[in-house]
Image: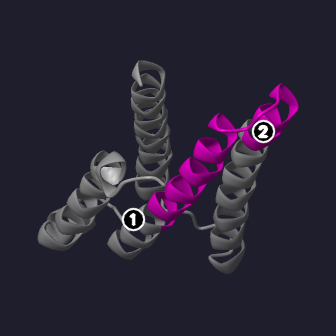
Amino acid sequence: MIKIVQFNPIIWVCVGVIIAGFAGENTLKHWGFDTLMLIIGNVILCAVTIVSLFFLKKGMNAPSTAQFLGAVYGSFIIKLLFVAIVVFGYAFTHKGALNKPSLFTLLFLYLVYTFLEIQSLLHIGKKKSSV
């Protein structure tokens, strides 16, 4: 069972971006950001990262290498496809008028969440190997 402590960095970043989006809404709009897109995209990235972390944690406990690789590749593909579908859905509904500052910020957040996911996995693996 994954403890909530391993999600703390992911949840703190998610909550921090949401608070920054609401607190600095006027400033962000002045700089050209779509704050609603930024907040919703952040929540989606956070949720997908947590689901991906569950798959990867399950893969770490797999008895065979094939099951481990299946969990890793499955997690990666699910995360990538879900994010791609959301981006294409956003582009389709906005008829190509993408908000580039928010989109690039979300791409950066994707990298941050991926880094935090890997950090959490390394933390889990370190605890598992020291037991």
Q: Say which residue appears at 65% left-offset and 38% top-offset.
A: 61
Front position among marks 1 and 2: 2
Q: Which residue sits furthest front?
A: 131
Asked if residue 51 is among those painted magenta in the image, a careful observer would answer yes
> Which residue is labeled 2 in the image?
73
Q: Residues within 10 Å of mark 2 (few under 14, many from 20)?
A: some
> Which residue is labeled 1 in the image?
38
- Residue 68 marker: none
Instruction: Find numbered disc 1 in the image and state the secondary structure of the residue it sits on.
Output: helix
Q: Position of residue 21 (x, y in %)?
A: 24, 67
Q: Say which residue appears at 21% left-offset and 58% top-offset.
A: 16
Instruction: Find numbered disc 2 in the image and state the secondary structure of the residue it sits on.
Output: helix
Q: Is 94 placed above or below 5 here? A: below
Q: Say which residue appears at 48% left-offset and 34% top-offset.
A: 121
Q: Which residue sits furthest right?
A: 66
Q: Amino acid at mark 1?
A: Leu
**Sequence-earlier tag: 1 or 2:** 1
Q: Is residue 35 left or right of residue 2?
A: left
Q: Is residue 35 left or right of residue 83?
A: left
Instruction: Give the dominant element type of the magenta stretch: helix, strand or loop.
Output: helix
The residue stretch that appears in magenta: 44-71
| CA gap, disc 1 and disc 2 | 27 Å
What kind of colouring is applied to the model shown? one colour
Q: Residues within 10 Å of mark 1 (few under 14, many from 20)?
A: many
Which quadrant would the C terminus be assigned to in this image?
top left
Q: Is 73 placed above or below 52 here? A: above
Q: Position of residue 20 (x, y in %)?
A: 18, 62
Q: Is residue 47 left or right of residue 26?
A: right
